[in-house]
């Protein structure tokens, strides 16, 4: 995921509010593929969703990020 840095003296990283996952099912197995992220607007009245890919099937799930999000869920 892309992280935005400010140019202030102490650079801060704008972490996403949610990670976007494509969830597909094959038989009895469920597969989670990270496809993007979303960031809260400064006024708190909306979000920006940035997708790296656009899934053609399955569903998109937004989840709060955690340390395990570096690898795809299985």
Image (cartoon, rainbow, N blue to C red):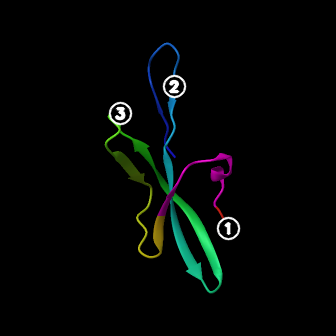
Expressed as whole percent of the image width and height from the top left, the position of residue 13 reads 52, 30
Residue, disc 3: 42
Lateral position of residue 48 relative to residue 63, left or right: left
Q: State which mark lies toward you, 3 or 2.
A: 3
Q: Is residue 54 above or below residue 41?
A: below
- Element at label 3: loop
Give the image location of residue 72, x and y in percent. 63, 60
Q: Is residue 33 or residue 44 the one in the foreground?
A: 44
Compare marks 2 and 1 and give the one earlier in the sequence: 2
Residue 51 badge? none
Q: Position of residue 42 (x, y in %)?
A: 35, 33
The 10 Å Cα crowd at callout 1, few under 14, some 14 to 19, many 20 or more, is: few
The quadrant the C terminus occupies is bottom right
Residue stretch rendered in magenta on the structure: 61-72
What label sits on residue 12 in the rendered view? Answer: 2
Towards the viewer: 71 or 28: 28
Q: Which residue is mark 1?
A: 74
Does residue 70 lie above or below 13 as drawn? below
């Amino acid at each position: 995921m892309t992280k935005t840095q400010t140019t202030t003296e102490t650079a801060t990283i704008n972490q996403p509010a949610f990670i976007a996952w494509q969830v597909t099912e094959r038989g009895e197995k469920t597969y989670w593929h990270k496809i993007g992220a979303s960031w809260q607007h400064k006024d708190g009245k909306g979000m920006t969703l940035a997708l790296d890919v656009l899934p053609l099937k399955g569903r998109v799930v937004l989840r709060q990020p955690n340390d395990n999000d570096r690898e795809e869920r299985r």
